[in-house]
Image (cartoon, rainbow, N blue to C red):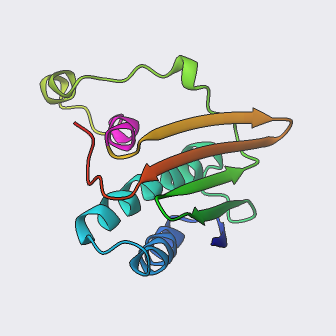
């Protein structure tokens, strides 16, 4: 099953994304914790794209495609904003964040913890983040 949502790059649209993901997954996933974790991961990626890649420019949009299969779900989130280079990202440790009292910077750490696969691609002007989660696994250890 495939679902699609296009939203303009405004922070207020994050609620629409959360509701969309939650509603679509309820038909396939019966564990609220698992749904909430996936919603959180997708929300984090979308927030990063809206804020950091597209600078909250309401003329720009992100596209979210959800592919539900019998054993898992794939989220493809794409935009044409500023490219995110995963090679330049240094994942902070929780201790580092607590010690420096730094706000932000742990979103991808959280996404990597929740999802089974996280991938970023850039082709021409299109940036895509692919998230995959196998059903029945609330969180990776």
User: Which residue extends farthest right?
Assistant: 124
Residue closer to the observer: 12 or 126: 126
Question: Which SS does the magenta portion mostly show?
Answer: helix
Residue at point 49% right, 71% down? 12
Residue at point 44% right, 73% down? 25
Residue at point 20% right, 21% down? 96
- Side (left or right) of 52 relative to 140: right
Placement of the N terminus among the 4 image quadrants: bottom right
- Please provide the residue range marked out in magenta: 105-113
Compared with 109, 56 (above or below) is: below
Placement of the C terminus among the 4 image quadrants: top left
- Image location (x, y in percent) of residue 28: 43, 75
User: Which residue extends farthest front?
Assistant: 70
Q: Is residue 29 magenta?
A: no
Where residue 121 sits, quadrant-wise, is: top right
| Residue 48 visible in the displayed image | no
- Image location (x, y in percent) of residue 42: 47, 56
Residue closer to the observer: 112 or 50: 112
- Image location (x, y in percent) of residue 78: 69, 51
Compared with 78, 19 (above or below) is: below
- Side (left or right) of 54 relative to 117: right
């Amino acid at each position: 099953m495939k679902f699609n949502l296009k939203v303009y790059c405004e922070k207020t649209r994050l609620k629409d994304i959360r509701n969309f993901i939650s509603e679509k997954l309820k038909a396939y996933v019966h564990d609220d914790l698992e749904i909430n974790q996936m919603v959180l991961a997708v929300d984090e990626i979308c927030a990063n794209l809206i804020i950091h890649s597209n600078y909250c420019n309401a003329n720009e949009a992100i596209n979210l495609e959800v592919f539900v299969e019998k054993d898992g779900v794939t989220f493809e989130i794409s935009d044409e904003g500023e490219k995110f280079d995963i090679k330049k990202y240094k994942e902070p440790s929780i201790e580092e964040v607590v010690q420096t009292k730094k706000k932000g910077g742990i979103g991808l750490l959280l996404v990597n913890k929740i999802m089974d696969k996280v991938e970023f691609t850039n082709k021409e002007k299109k940036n895509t983040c692919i998230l995959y989660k196998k059903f029945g696994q609330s969180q990776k250890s």
